[in-house]
Image (cartoon, rainbow, N blue to C red):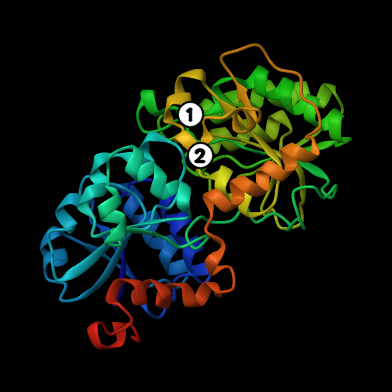
């Protein structure tokens, strides 16, 4: 049996899990989502999400986790209770690194508790070794291995042919959330004027008249009004330059008054992204970077000087630094990406995302994982057919 363990009170996290099923990475008939039981209003909302999408789930206590007899349990997020869940040694415990990025959360010591760690590509393995989470010997013993774009998620934007293609009719902006604690706040939402100035530059440079914004599902969880405050400042700045702003809020939880204020402001809210194609994109230090690379979208990262130390050694070079926009410095002048810079995106793509599984359909990726875990004899070791 395949299990996925979810310990969260953030409704947006449950919505992120749904994507594994809609993308057919996880089979609804062969996977059970185990949700840590809380007496909290979010439990009812999380239940509604899984019921709506016909995903098998149940709320569990520690005792119920201990009673599981066999199988593989996947962990998309690090949570304190994961330390307790891995105590059941009849299961194989696999951290799937959902939201893999250069954030500090991708290299926290808690990662050592898992039997195996999945990364998208070689850069993920480098992070683990450079941060002394694992050793080269651990990698040789398959404590961590790559599975390409299996768990990185998708932007849902219309596909692009390659980085150099001139196609695309929007400027895409996907800021991360403000983090669970203040020192892990990588969000550009706290710099609305600098962001707006940069987006306006990009639209003029590429002849675009629309910005489509996709906030992180957790935006506003710690700093409640951060998203609304940002839009209140940015929307009129874009409008004054003849640039439309549309915001994708499908997975973002907003209160009644927040929705009312957005409507009064005039911000257009959209419910899907598949009809849009990005000519240029902007994100923060976040997992969106990997998605943009996977989808051949040229992009910049909004960044803070203090976070340069988080970058693996292979990214500590000028080619990478050229597409960072420092929010704690004066706004830089944008220029169209050169042929060399566009070619470098392809180099990054190969580093971030192992291409060896590109031929493997999403629905077959878990079978590949089981083969890695059980040495090709998974049918004898584990029943994953029901």
Contact? badges 2 and 1 (CB < 8 Å): yes
Image: 247 above or below 241: below
Provide residue 78's location: percent of width, then percent of height.
30, 47
Image: 93 above or below 385: above
Provide residue 263's location: percent of width, then percent of height.
68, 35
Instruction: Measure how far apart labels 2 and 1 are at the Cα level.
Output: 8 Å
Image: 40 above or below 181: below
Total count of labels: 2
Element type at mark 2: loop
Q: Residue furthest top?
A: 330
Quadrant of the snapshot with the C terminus: bottom left
Residue assigned mark 1: 186
Quadrant of the snapshot with the N terminus: bottom left
Q: Is residue 292 visible?
A: no
The residue lying at 59 percent from left, 37 percent from top is: 259
Provide residue 149's location: percent of width, then percent of height.
53, 60
Residue assigned mark 2: 286
């Amino acid at each position: 049996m395949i299990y996925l363990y979810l310990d969260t009170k953030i409704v947006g996290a449950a919505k992120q899990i749904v994507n594994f099923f809609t993308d057919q990475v996880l089979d609804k008939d062969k996977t059970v989502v185990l949700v840590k039981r809380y007496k909290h209003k979010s439990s009812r909302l999380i239940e509604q999400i899984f019921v709506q999408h016909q995903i098998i789930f149940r709320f569990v206590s520690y005792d119920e986790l201990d009673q599981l007899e066999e199988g593989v349990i996947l962990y998309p997020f690090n949570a304190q209770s994961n330390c307790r869940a891995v105590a059941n040694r009849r299961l194989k415990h696999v951290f799937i690194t959902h939201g893999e990025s250069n954030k500090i959360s991708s290299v926290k010591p808690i990662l050592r508790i898992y039997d195996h760690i999945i990364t998208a590509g070689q850069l993920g393995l480098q992070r683990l070794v450079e941060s002394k989470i694992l050793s080269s010997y651990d990698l040789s013993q398959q404590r961590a291995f790559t599975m390409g774009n299996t768990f990185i998620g998708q932007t849902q934007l219309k596909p692009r042919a390659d980085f150099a293609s001139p196609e695309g009719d929007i400027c895409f902006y996907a800021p991360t959330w403000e983090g669970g604690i203040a020192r892990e706040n990588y969000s550009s939402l706290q710099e609305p004027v600098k962001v707006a100035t940069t987006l306006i530059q990009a639209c003029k440079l590429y002849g675009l008249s629309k910005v489509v914004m996709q906030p992180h599902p957790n935006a506003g969880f710690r700093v409640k009004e951060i998203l609304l405050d940002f839009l209140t400042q940015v929307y009129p700045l874009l409008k004054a330059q003849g640039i439309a702003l549309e915001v994708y809020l499908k997975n973002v939880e907003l209160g009644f008054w927040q929705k009312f204020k957005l409507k009064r402001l005039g911000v257009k809210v959209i419910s899907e992204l598949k009809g849009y194609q990005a000519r240029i994109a902007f994100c923060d230090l976040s997992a969106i970077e990997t998605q943009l690379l996977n989808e051949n979208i040229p992009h910049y990262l909004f960044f803070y000087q203090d976070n340069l130390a988080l970058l693996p050694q292979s990214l500590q070079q000028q080619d990478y630094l050229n597409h960072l926009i420092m929010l704690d410095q004066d706004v830089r002048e944008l220029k169209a990406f050169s042929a060399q810079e566009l070619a470098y995106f392809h180099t990054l793509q190969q580093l971030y995302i192992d291409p060896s599984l590109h031929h493997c359909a999403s629905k077959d990726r878990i079978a590949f994982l089981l083969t890695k875990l059980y040495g090709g004899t998974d049918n004898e070791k584990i029943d994953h057919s029901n």
